[in-house]
Amino acid sequence: MNPFNIRPATIEDISQILSFIKKLAAYEKLEHEVVATCQDIEETLFGPHPTAYALMLEENKIPIGFALYFHNYSTFLCRPGIYIEDIYVEPAFRGKGYGKAVFKYLADMAEENNYGRIEWWCLDWNKPSIDFYTEKLGAEPMKDWTVFRLDQKDIKKLRLGE
């Protein structure tokens, strides 16, 4: 029996998800950006209109990581896809193939639903992840694209015409 399991997160996993979010933020040196609460997770992942989905990664039924994804859409393909927002595996459990298992799980989902692609971002300094994506998955970094963002402050300024 394989001690590793991936399963859809349930409402009972909320506090564990928040803990993993904080650990991921610490790894990415972005702790100052985490404002998420258990209530936010409940509303956005388990409310009447979920906007994202989480997977729990377990070894011997103990949570060792999570993945968070949502659906996107390609106008050129006219198909939905999967955008992976985050994958986190506890440091002691890295290197066992669990990250690749998450990608396979989502690839199976994409195949079953005729999705057009799976996409994600990676911080440019995160060489271990970049190496994993290119060498283990065969993913290719997008060239000629720049990521843009409007945060809540910028959205408000835009709305008010400032």
Image (spheres, helix red, strand yellow):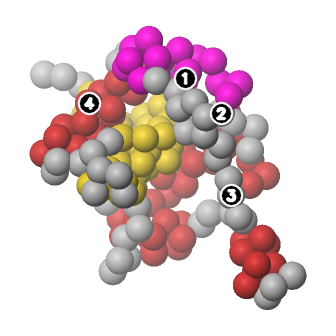
Residue 162 in percent (x, y) is at: 86, 82
Mark 1–mark 2 contact, CB under 8 Å? yes
Q: Which mark is residue 123?
A: 2
Q: Is residue 154 above or below residue 160?
A: above
Q: Is residue 153 above or below residue 14?
A: below
Looking at the image, which is closer to me, 111 or 29?
111
Dot 3 or dot 2, earlier in sequence:
2
How far is mark 3 from mark 2, CA to CA? 15 Å
Looking at the image, which is closer to me, 130 or 76?
76
Residue denoted by label 4: 104
Q: Is residue 70 above or below residue 99?
A: below
Name which residue type carries label 1. Answer: Ser
How many residues crowd around disc 1 within 10 Å: few (fewer than 14), some, or many (20 or more)?
A: some
- Toward the bottom, the furthest residue is 160
How many residues crowd around disc 2 within 10 Å: few (fewer than 14), some, or many (20 or more)?
A: few
Residue denoted by label 3: 149
Residue denoted by label 1: 129
Tell me where residue 117 sits by quadrant.
top left
Decide whether residue 126 is among the magenta residues. yes
Name which residue type carries label 3. Answer: Arg
Residue 12 seen anywhere in this rendered image of the structure: no
Dot 1 or dot 4, earlier in sequence:
4
Dot 3 or dot 1, earlier in sequence:
1
Range of residues picked out in magenta? 124-139
